[in-house]
């Protein structure tokens, strides 16, 4: 039996995921492997480095800093989330990321990002949280229209959620057969077709096939969530999700709102904790 953890993205909806992960760490829940998409990656890496509370701490502290997330950053650098500040200044200086613990922890940690050459989701195994791993994490969380493509390992990449929002099939393909998914939308959520088609057509004009994928992404997402519901009903996956819409903006800056959604994640994880333990322990 291989236990896997699957983390959906969702920008600042990921504060729900942070609350869930902190409860799991506090209760010594461990997995053999993890895969993250977008916010699931940049918050989930703290699970492998075992830094309880770190994500909430730095997000609340720097959420209003224009170097962290702002239209000024978008205009100046091409990234609404400042690449240098988010991926170097914070983890290297301001709130250090524990790379040594990350490196020594045995859990496999996969990052998914969308290959702009063919629209496929490609996965990278992070081993040491060094510069290459960091670039893959950044790529996975680089939202289309408000981020520059990331070039790493010969790929040109953007947000993994474009091509594979909830990568349960990837984990199954790697032999993980006891999987837990942390989602950031409630069970009754249905994604509608984007209203930003023109924006994507302009911002992704060099990649017209990717722009087209953005216009049909809702179908892929809804199909994935339905399959997960079916698997959940059959006992083939354990899901922790919000009981209702989180009601938070993708680029939320209010520390109180960020804390509220984090607390929702904690509450839901605590409520499901005993059932989760039974699921992971059953033969």
Image (tube, rainbow, N blue to C red):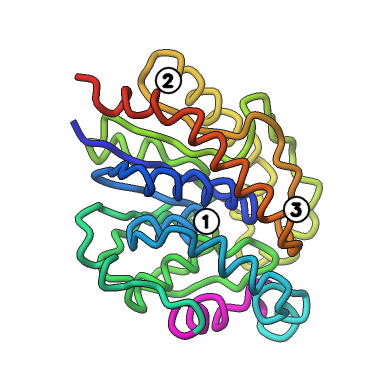
> What residue is at 42 percent from the left and 54 percent from the top?
112
Could you tell me how far apart the alpha carbons at marks 2 and 1 are, in whole angstroms? 23 Å
* Region in magenta: 78-93
- Does residue 203 appear in this view? yes
The quadrant in which residue 92 appears is bottom left
* Circles 2, 1 touching at the beta carbon (< 8 Å): no
* Circles 2, 3 touching at the beta carbon (< 8 Å): no
Residue 129 position within the rendered picture, expressed as x and y whole percent measured from the top left: 33, 71
Q: Which numbered disc, 2 or 3, marks the residue closer to the eye? A: 3
- Does residue 154 appear in this view? no
Tell me which label, 2 or 1, sits earlier in the chain: 1
Please tell me the numbered disc located at residue 38.
Answer: 1
150 over 43 or under it: above or below = below
Q: Secondary structure at mark 3?
A: loop
63 over 159 or under it: above or below = below
> What residue is at 27 percent from the left and 70 percent from the top?
128
Image quarter in which the C terminus is found:
top left
Whether 106 is among the magenta residues is no
Q: Nearer the viewer, residue 23 or 121?
A: 23
Could you tell me how far apart the alpha carbons at marks 2 and 3 are, in whole angstroms? 29 Å
Please tell me the numbered disc located at residue 249.
Answer: 3
Of all residues, the one furthest to the top in this rendering is 234
Whether 79 is among the magenta residues is yes
The residue where tag 2 is placed is 231
Tell me which label, 2 or 3, sits earlier in the chain: 2
Circle 3 crowding by C-alpha within 10 Å: few under 14, some 14–19, many from 20: some
* Circles 3, 1 touching at the beta carbon (< 8 Å): no
Q: Secondary structure at mark 2?
A: helix
Residue 81 position within the rendered picture, expressed as x and y whole percent measured from the top left: 64, 72
> What residue is at 46 percent from the left and 14 percent from the top?
233
Residue 115 position within the rendered picture, expressed as x and y whole percent measured from the top left: 46, 59
Circle 2 crowding by C-alpha within 10 Å: few under 14, some 14–19, many from 20: some
């Amino acid at each position: 039996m291989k236990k896997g953890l699957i983390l959906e993205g969702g920008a600042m909806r990921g504060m729900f995921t942070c609350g869930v992960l902190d409860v799991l760490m506090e209760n010594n829940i461990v997995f053999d492997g993890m895969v993250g998409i977008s916010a699931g990656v940049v918050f989930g890496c703290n699970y492998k480095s075992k830094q309880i509370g770190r994500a909430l701490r730095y997000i609340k502290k720097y959420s209003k800093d224009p170097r962290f997330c702002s239209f000024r950053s978008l205009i100046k650098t091409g990234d609404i989330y400042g690449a240098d500040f988010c991926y170097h200044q914070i983890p290297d200086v301001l709130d250090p990321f524990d790379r040594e613990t990350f490196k020594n922890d045995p859990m496999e940690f996969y990052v998914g990002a969308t290959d702009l050459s063919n629209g496929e989701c490609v996965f990278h195994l992070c081993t040491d949280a060094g510069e290459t791993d960091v670039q893959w994490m950044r790529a996975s969380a680089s939202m289309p229209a408000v981020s520059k493509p990331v070039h790493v390992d010969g790929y040109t990449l953007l947000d993994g959620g474009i091509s594979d929002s909830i990568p349960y099939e990837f984990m199954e393909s790697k032999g993980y057969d006891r999987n837990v998914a942390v989602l950031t939308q409630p069970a009754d959520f249905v994604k509608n077709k984007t209203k930003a088609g023109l924006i994507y057509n302009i911002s992704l004009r060099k990649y017209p096939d990717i722009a087209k994928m953005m216009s049909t992404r809702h179908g892929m997402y809804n199909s994935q969530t339905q399959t997960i519901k079916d698997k959940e009903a059959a006992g083939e996956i354990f899901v922790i999700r919000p009981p209702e819409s989180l009601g938070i903006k993708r680029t939320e800056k209010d520390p109180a709102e960020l804390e509220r959604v984090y607390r929702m994640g904690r509450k839901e994880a605590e409520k499901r904790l005993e059932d989760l333990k039974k699921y992971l322990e059953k033969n």
